[in-house]
Amino acid sequence: MNSISNLKSNSNNNSESKVIIFDTTLRDGEQALAASLTCREKLQIAFALERLGVDIIEAGFPVSSPGDFQSVQTIAREIKNSRIAGLSRALDKDIDAAAEALKVAEAFRIHTFIATSTIHVENKLRKNFDDVVEMAVRAVKRARNYTDDVEFSCEDAGRTPIDNLCRMVEETIKAGATTINIPDTVGYTLPSEFGGIIETLFNRVPNIDQAVISVHCHDDLGLSVANSIAAVQAGARQIECTINGIGERAGNCSLEEIVMIMETRKDQLATFTNINTREIHRTSQLVSNLCNMPIQANKAIVGTNAFSHSSGIHQDGVLKSQNTYEIMTPETVGLNTNKLNLTSRSGRHVIKHRMEELGYTSSDYDLDELYESFLRLADKKGQIFDYDLEALVLFSNLSEEDDFYSLQSLSVQSGSNNTSTATVSLQCGDEIIIEAAIGNGPVNSICSCISRITGYAIEIKDFKVASTSTGMDALGQVNIMAAYNSRNFHGMGLATDIIRSSAKALIHVVNDIRRTEKVAVLRDSNRKLNQGNV
C-alpha cells in the first residue's frame, strides 16, 4: 500500500496537483440507509471502490456494533490497493476498537473527531473549548500509538469561530495528525465562505504544511460539490465524498460529480485524481442497487438522462458534432452501447469477451456460473443485453457463502377474489421444509409460508418492483424493506417472474436476520466469557 508520503504527494507534473479521494459511502452513506448492509454487501462495494481507484475507503465505525466491527475488519483484510480507514470519536474505547479492527491491514488510517462549533460544544458536549482541545489532542496521540496515518476532524467546522478553528488545527497537527478534515457538517456555508475558511487556515496556522487539509461537505442547501471545489481552489487536497452523494439528511458531496468536474475543467483547476472514471457508472449502479436507493433520472453524471437528448435542435447538433451538447462523452464514465447480440446460441467465449468490454476481469465472476445463469435467462428472454449480464453478476455475487435458506420450489395460485395460495419449498441447512399458506395476494401468501418455515414473523414495510431491462420477459428486480424485532432488513430478488423475485427477496431478508442473530449470540457469549475471566 502507498505510504503516507505518497498519499500526500501533490504533483504528478509541474502544473497539476493530486487531490486525494476519501470515500465514505460505507460509513456516512451506509448509516443513512433504512436497513444496514451486510458484511458481504459492504465488501462488494469496497471491491468496486478499489477498482474505481479510491485512495481512502472509510469502511465504518468499528465501535458502533459487532457487525460494523466485523465489516471493517473484513474489508481491511481483503482490500489491498486502497487504504482503509475506521471512524472513532475522541474516546479511548473508540480508538482502540478501530485499531483492533484495522490491524489486519498492512497500513491503515484512524479517523477521530470531536465537535468544535460553539453550538455543539455548549449544547451537545456541554464542555468548554479548552476541554475539547485537550480531548482532541489526547485522541490524536492515542491513535498515533497504532498508526502514523491519523486524521482528525473538526465537526461542524463551518460554524466554528475562526480563532477556535485555527487553534484546534494547530494543536492537533502538533499532536501528530497527518490529515486535518474541515467538515461543513450541516451544509450551511456558501462556497465563498467555505473557501475563505480554508484560505484563512493556510494563512494563520503555522504548521499547516505538516498535514493534508481535507473537506467533508454535506448537501443540505445543495452546495456540497460547490463548497468542495471552492476548498480545492483554496488549497485543500483531500475531498471526502460518497457514491451517488448518499449520506445523512440531504447527503454528501457526490464522488462522481467532484471527480468529473476536476477531469472536465482541468484548465481551470489544474488538479487530478487517481479515479478510473470508466468505472463510475458501474460503481454507481452497484451502490444504488445494494443500498436500495434509486438514482434520479436527471442526476448529474450517472442519471439515465445525463447523456440523453430530446430536443430536435440538440439531437441535430449532437449528430453533427458530439461536443455541441456534451461536455464529456458517455464512454468516459463507463457507459457502453450494446455491440453484440447475445442469445442462447452464444458461447462462453462471447460472454467472457463481453464482460471484458464492460470492464470486468475473470476474478470478478465465475464464468461457468454466469454462463449457466445466462443460458437460463436467454431461453426465457431471447436476446440478452449488457445490463442483463451485469445484473446476473450482481445478484450471483450477493449469495452469501453461509446462506442457510434457499428456494427449492414455488407454486402460487391467485385470482380476482383477493385470496392467493402459495406452496414454498425451502432448503434449510441439511433439510427441505415445505409449507403452504393463504394470503390476500401472492406475495403475502409467500411471506406467510416463509415466516412459518423460518419462525421469523417479518412485516413488509416497503415493496418495490423495477425492470432492469426491456421487453415482456425483462428481468424484474424486487426490493423489500422488512421489519423484524424493531430492526429493518433489506432484501433483493431478481428473476423474469416477479413472484419468484419476491420470494428471493424475502429469503434474502430471513438469511440476513439469521446472520444478525448469530452475531448477537456470539457477542453475548464473548461478554459472558469476559465477565467470567474477570
Image (tube, rainbow, N blue to C red):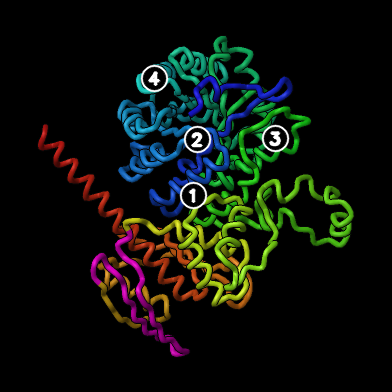
Give the image quarter of residue 443.
bottom left
Q: Secondary structure at mark 2?
A: loop
Q: Earlier in the sequence, mark 4 or mark 2?
A: 2
Categorize mark 4 by other alpha carbons within 10 Å: few (<14), some (14-19), many (20+). Answer: many
Q: Looking at the image, is 309 positioned above or below residue 506?
A: above
Residue placed under numbered mark 4 in the picture: 144
Among the two numbered marks 3 and 4 on one chain, the one whose residue lies closer to the N terminus: 4
Q: For mark 1, what is the residue?
A: 363
Q: For marks 4 and 2, give the CA distance.
A: 22 Å
The amino acid pointed to by label 1 is: Ser
Q: The residue under label 4 is which amino acid type?
A: Arg
Q: Amino acid at mark 3?
A: Met
Q: Residues within 10 Å of mark 3 (few under 14, many from 20)?
A: some
Observer-side mark, 2 or 1, equals: 1
Q: Which residue is mark 2?
A: 81
Is the residue 391 above or below the residue 77 in the image?
A: below
CA–CA distance in space, label 2 to label 3: 22 Å
Where the C terminus falls, by quadrant? top left
Can see residue 132? no
Q: Position of residue 337 (x, y in %)?
A: 70, 59
* Mark sitting earlier along the chain (2/3): 2
Residue 475, compared with residue 234, is above or below; it is below
Mark 3 = which residue? 262
Disc 3 is placed on an element classified as helix
Residue 71 occupies quadrant: top left
Residue span colored magenta: 403-431
Three-letter code for the amino acid on which mark 2 is drawn:
Asn
